[in-house]
Amino acid sequence: MKPELILLNISGPDKTGITASLTEILANYDATILDIGQADIHHTLSLGILIKTDSERSGKIIKELLLKTRDLQVQVSFDVVTEEAYNDWVSRQGKGRYIVTMLGRQITARQISEVAKIITTQGLNIETITRLTGRIPLDESEQPAAKACIEMLVRGTPQNRENMQARFMQLAAKLNFDISFQEDTMYRRSRRLVCFDMDSTLIGTEVIDELADRAGVGEQVRAITEAAMRGEIDFKESFTRRVALLKGLDVSVMKEIAENLPITEGVERLMTVLKRSGYKTAILSGGFTYFGEYLKQRFGIDYVYANELEVGPDGKLTGRYLGDIVDGERKKELLKIIAQVENINIAQTIAVGDGANDLPMLSTAGLGIAFHAKPKVKAEAGQSISTIGIDGVLYFLGFKDSYIQT
């Protein structure tokens, strides 16, 4: 007897027991469930079940389902699926799967519409959309630092992935939201190591500028810092010049600066969740070890690699540094070394930074995220967060508010 493929679409007020009642009818007639999906949007159920049965049983199944759904006060519709259509759907299994994450203080209809258009023009199909952030209060004053995030699962092969990524970034800048486009591989939800830049990433300042202010050379140092972060000056050269200007500064000022560092929004939440979830964390910084160690103790960070300032016997900075400079290339190598020590595949690593000297590690990591970064860095990184705090990294990893409340 030729099989019949029937797609059941059930919708209506959600209540306990609907799925159990309907699948029991299917079980009584030995129907095979080929696919099933369910969503609940504001207490409204949307349930789809694709079944295989035969012509002798299909009529009885439909009759019982109609009676049961009437009792349950939900609606049901039936669509016949051809074998050709089903086989075409099966043949797409295993083809490209990507995750598009939209993130911001709020996600608007315009933002979703424009992102969906780009996805469509690339020949991709949106299969599911999931909200990762908590429920939004109508009174925005109740949640002044609100976050909104949705995640789309899309399938297919982009016609031009590089162009698609560029259009996403341009749109995000124009409509004030963040977006991530990741391949949905086995590594995407099994990341294990996160490496952070420190200055202007975990903290809202450049520590060398704070030291320079105390030394009375703030303007000179800031000018060099900004040029280096824009990639206009070689980092090693700029670092050497800036440290030389700190000569004679009393080392005691570092304690006062460390205790008053402006911690970036979301750091505590991010570190708490990462630690609880078994991630290893590292600071790879072109800044200074003293401040990295302070953050390590405060947030339980596993590794710190930064630059060591030389202190003279008089307790003052000599204007020199000890050891090799941690520049962009060194950050990349340290990322690889830590991953190797922890027996972590490089595809399972994440790097987060804001400056040009972070680009080597951002491009090496399995996921590189530019955080409140310079335009050049955002353009090259591919993924960026500019609208909310650094805990936005959690949403790019697929975490939901419902299970990461701290």
Image (cartoon, rainbow, N blue to C red):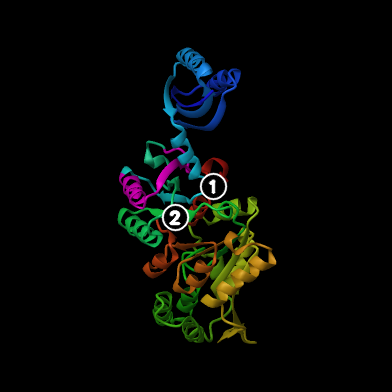
* Horizontal side of residue 107 vs 30, given as left or right: left
Amino acid marked by disc 2: Phe
Please say whether residue 336 is one of the residues in the magenta stretch: no
Q: Is residue 43 above or below residue 338?
A: above
Res. 388 in view: no
SS at mark 2? strand
| Contact flag, marks 1 and 2 (Cβ < 8 Å) | no
Q: Is residue 380 visible?
A: yes
The location of residue 377, given as percent across then percent down, is 42, 68
Front label number (1 vs 2): 2
Mark 2 nearby-residue class (10 Å; few <14, some 14–19, many ≥20): many
Residue 256 is drawn in which quadrant? bottom right
281 vs 63, nearest the viewer: 63
Residue 266's spot in the image, x, y percent? 50, 54
**Among numbered discs 1 and 2, the one appearing first in the sequence:** 2
Residue ID for mark 2: 181
Q: Is residue 107 left or right of residue 280?
A: left
Q: Which residue is mark 1?
A: 399
Q: Which residues are magenta?
A: 110-136
Q: Amino acid at mark 1?
A: Phe
Q: Position of residue 204 (x, y in %)?
A: 46, 64
Q: Residue at x 63, y 56 (%)?
A: 279
Seen at 51% across and 25% down, the residue is: 2
